[in-house]
Amino acid sequence: MSMSTERPQHRLRRAGLVLLWVILLLVVTIAANVVGIHLAGGIEDWQQWLTAHASYFLAWRLLLYGVTAWGWLWMRRRVLAREPGARQRLLRAEIAAVVAVAALEISQITGG
């Protein structure tokens, strides 16, 4: 079912679920930083710890990117088999994802 044929209640419910996940992710991120700052003994120590372990975080991100790419390719094959006209839509999503990931990684490298 495409978004254009969905009932408004379903779209509203889906938007609510996305918002709930975003809020949950923000809460978990803030909690992790607060706990980290507390355990490290202060903000400066927490920042030093993060800097010292940056290579582990890079490895973690690369692993997540790899798993996500594998899942995307699996899903892409299924979608194209079911909906051959979806190729352009998928390509746009792929380009947007690569640009977003590149922007995030560049901002990590440049410290921005």
Image (tube, rainbow, N blue to C red):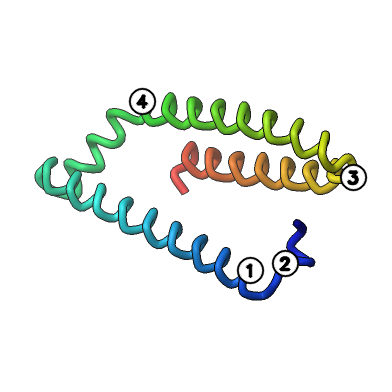
Q: Is residue 48 above or below residue 13?
A: above
Question: Which amino acid lies under the numbered mark 2 shown in the image of this protein?
Answer: Glu
Q: Name the residue that disc number 4 marks.
A: 56
Q: Which numbered disc, 3 or 4, marks the residue that appears first in the sequence? A: 4
Q: Nearer the viewer, mark 2 or mark 4?
A: 2
Q: Is residue 50 above or below residue 11?
A: above
Question: Which amino acid lies under the numbered mark 4 shown in the image of this protein?
Answer: Tyr
In space, the residues marked 1 and 4 are separated at their CA atoms by 39 Å
Q: Are marks 1 and 3 in contact (CB under 8 Å)?
A: no
| Depth order, front residue of 49/35 | 35
Kindly state the secondary structure of the residue where label 3 is placed.
Answer: helix
**Residue drawn where x is 37% and y is 57% of the image:** 24
**Residue drawn where x is 80% and y is 42% of the image:** 91
Kindly state the secondary structure of the residue where label 2 is placed.
Answer: loop
Left or right? Give the position of 51 relative to 85: left
In space, the residues marked 3 and 4 are separated at their CA atoms by 40 Å
Q: Nearer the viewer, mark 3 or mark 2?
A: 2
Kindly state the secondary structure of the residue where label 1 is placed.
Answer: helix
Q: Name the residue that disc number 1 marks.
A: 11
Q: Name the residue that disc number 3 marks.
A: 85
**Residue drawn where x is 72% and y is 67% of the image:** 6
